[in-house]
Image (cartoon, rainbow, N blue to C red):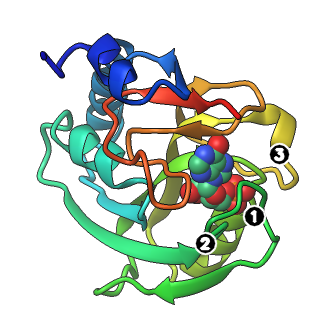
Amino acid sequence: MNYSNDDAWLKRFPELEILIPSETLQARVRELGCQIAQDYAANPPLLVGVLKGSLVFLADLMRSIPLPVSYDFVAISSYGAETQSTGQVRLIKDLDSPIHKRHVLVVEDIYDTGLTLSYLLGQLRQREPASLKVCTLLSKPERHQVEVDIAYCGFTIPDRFVVGYGLDYAERYRNLPFIAVLNG
Ligand code: IMP
């Protein structure tokens, strides 16, 4: 079986419906990387990934940015095994290094309600970075509760619970190379 083919994965995961195929994802991530490389040519950014969901996106994105970038991670408590936000947001892993006077680009998997991003941006802003912007792979406009300024967005999607490419349901599906809707 050739698992570079999305359809081959669906035979193993019949409960999924592909929303964004892997080729479309990869092409868009490369575009975002090119745009970021142009915008930050004079000021290579520190990429701040939000664990765990942004890991796959961050890994691909940084390899499309031909600049001397570095990266770091934060972890923020979120849904756990549920598909609905509890509204409770908490920093459970902080950055390893200070960001004062650095150009920081937060890399997030999805802007859903926006509670996570707005909390994180508030925390990071207090540390006075030289600049602070957000790159999100996905955005669900129908779910936004808090307005967050997004500099780079991969795809706008409908209000469906999605998995794959880093996004999980109860820690499953993060390794899928595409974004899929979980039926049932
Ligand atoms: P927020 O509601 O924008 O604060 O999103 C918080 C976190 O919930 C995101 O960073 C994701 O990790 C997770 N999340 C939101 N929507 C989905 C989804 O459709 N699938 C999987 N995880 C999601």
Q: Residue at x 24, y 53 (%)?
A: 44
Q: Is mark 3 within 8 Å of ligand 1?
A: yes
- Circle 1 packing at 10 Å, graded few (<14), some (14-19), many (20+), is some
For the residue labelled by badge 2, is the local secondary structure a helix, a strand or a loop?
helix
Q: Residue at x 62, y 70 (%)?
A: 80
Q: CA distance from mark 3 to mark 2?
A: 16 Å
Amino acid on which the number 2 mark rests in the picture: Leu
- Circle 2 packing at 10 Å, graded few (<14), some (14-19), many (20+), is some
Q: Residue at x 84, y 55 (%)?
A: 146
Q: How many marks?
A: 3
Q: Nearer the viewer, mark 3 or mark 2?
A: 3
* Lower position in the chain sequence, tag 3 or tag 2: 2
> Which residue in the protein does label 2 denote?
120
Q: Are marks 3 and 2 in contact (CB under 8 Å)?
A: no
**Is 108 left, or right, of 162 in this rendering?**
left
* Lower position in the chain sequence, tag 2 or tag 1: 1
Estimate the x, y position of residue 33 in percent, counting from the top left.
29, 32
Q: Is mark 2 within 8 Å of ligand 1?
A: no
Q: Are marks 2 and 1 in contact (CB under 8 Å)?
A: no
Task: Determine which quarter of the picture holds residue 78.
Answer: bottom right
Task: Determine which quarter of the picture holds residue 181.
Answer: top right
Amino acid on which the number 3 mark rests in the picture: His
> Which residue in the protein does label 3 denote?
144
Q: Visible in this render: residue 126? A: no
The numbered mark at residue 115 is 1
Q: Is mark 1 within 8 Å of ligand 1?
A: yes
For the residue labelled by badge 3, is the local secondary structure a helix, a strand or a loop?
loop
Estimate the x, y position of residue 132 in percent, counting from the top left.
51, 61
For the residue labelled by badge 1, is the local secondary structure a helix, a strand or a loop?
helix
Q: Nearer the viewer, mark 2 or mark 1?
A: 1
Q: Relative to 82, is 122 above or below?
A: below
Amino acid on which the number 1 mark rests in the picture: Leu
